[in-house]
Image: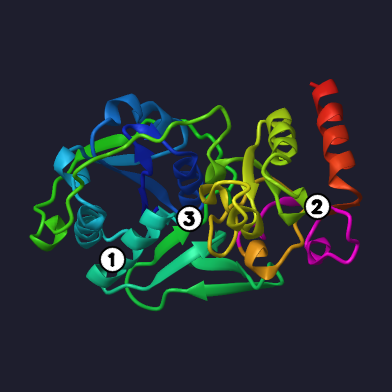
Amino acid sequence: MAEILVLVDHVDGEVKKVTFELLTLARRHGDAAAVWIGPGYEGAKDKLAEYGAAKVYVAADEELTSYVVAPKAELLAQLVAERSPAAVLVAATGEGKEIAGRLAVKTESGVLTDVVDVADGFVGEHSIFGGSIVSHAKVSKGTPIIAVRPNSTAPEAAPSTPAEEQVSVTLSDAAKAAKVVEKVVQEKGERPELTEAAIVVSGGRGVGGADNFKLIEELADSLGAAVGASRAATDAGWYPHTFQVGQTGKTVSPQLYIAVGISGAIQHRAGMQTSKTIVAINKDPEAPIFELVDYGVVGDLFQVAPKLTEEITKRK
């Protein structure tokens, strides 16, 4: 079977869930070949094997992570030239999409971004215009470079014994133009990271204030979910902008998305429309969000959310 390169998304050796999703997707179309860049591989190799990597290209040189994304694109371009893979899959994160664009230029290939599924022939599926339209696109030149949206594929374990191959690349001067001079570790709470969470609970304008976001947090904690917010809520200063879901915020695609007090403007829908199951709580029966949901609750969130939290807690 054809080899499909999967760029491993990791932070200091801790592999992000989207990588397991990409390996699962790659196995459907060929042999998944993980590409590991930077230190920390020894502590993560078992997880890559657990999710079916047939091969792992290991570029452990710390220099490759000492600069901004250009070195990763150069290493991938070298692998594409030497191995002629059927496709290259990366995570559709901010960094992943930049790597995909740079790689496409270097290999004179087409690139697809924000893909939610990949069909035979590497046809990418996109969900656009608030989920009202599903489009399909295919690269017409070179090696398909595909950036896949996190949480769009359920990761499936398939234990393997991958072959390992050490690889290296001589970086160009251009790749060294932007150097990382300092790394600051962001404090992590007990909640999952927003873009990787299987369940997301978001609050909007209807929450009414920063203090009331405690209702959203309590509901999220009862479900083991991440907390999100609409732009209206973050612009009002009720919740940090890093938790904004929407066209100008983060894109999420969890198994369950609960929108509390969110009207459902197109800008917000663009960031969560590919969620597998969508639930909305809003006292306005005409709110646009109800056009998108699987389940809608027309009611006062200050009554519904606490009761929902209470009921979920009882069933644990």
Residue at label 3?
29
From where the camera sits, is residue 274 visible? Answer: no
Label 2: which secondary element: strand
Q: Residue 78, percent across and down? A: 19, 58
Q: Earlier in the sequence, mark 1 or mark 2?
A: 1
Q: Is residue 283 magenta?
A: yes
Label 3: which secondary element: loop
Rendered residue at 18%/56% (across/down): 178
Q: Is residue 90 left or right of residue 183?
A: right
Residue at label 1?
102
Instruction: Specify start and end residues of the magenta stretch as a single range.
Output: 271-293
Q: Earlier in the sequence, mark 3 or mark 1?
A: 3
Structural distance between the alpha carbons of marks 2 and 3? 36 Å
Q: Earlier in the sequence, mark 2 or mark 3?
A: 3
Viewer-proximal residue among 34 and 182: 182
Residue 312 — which label?
none
Rendered residue at 72%/32% (across/down): 218
Q: Residue 138, percent across and down? A: 48, 74
* Circle 3 crowding by C-alpha within 10 Å: few under 14, some 14–19, many from 20: some
Task: Place residue 216 in its image quadrant.
Answer: top right
Rendered residue at 57%/66% (across/down): 125
Residue at label 2?
280
* Circle 2 crowding by C-alpha within 10 Å: few under 14, some 14–19, many from 20: many
Viewer-proximal residue among 180 and 49: 180
Residue type at mark 2: give it.
Answer: Ala
Classify 159 as above or below 31.
Answer: above
Q: Is residue 177 magenta?
A: no
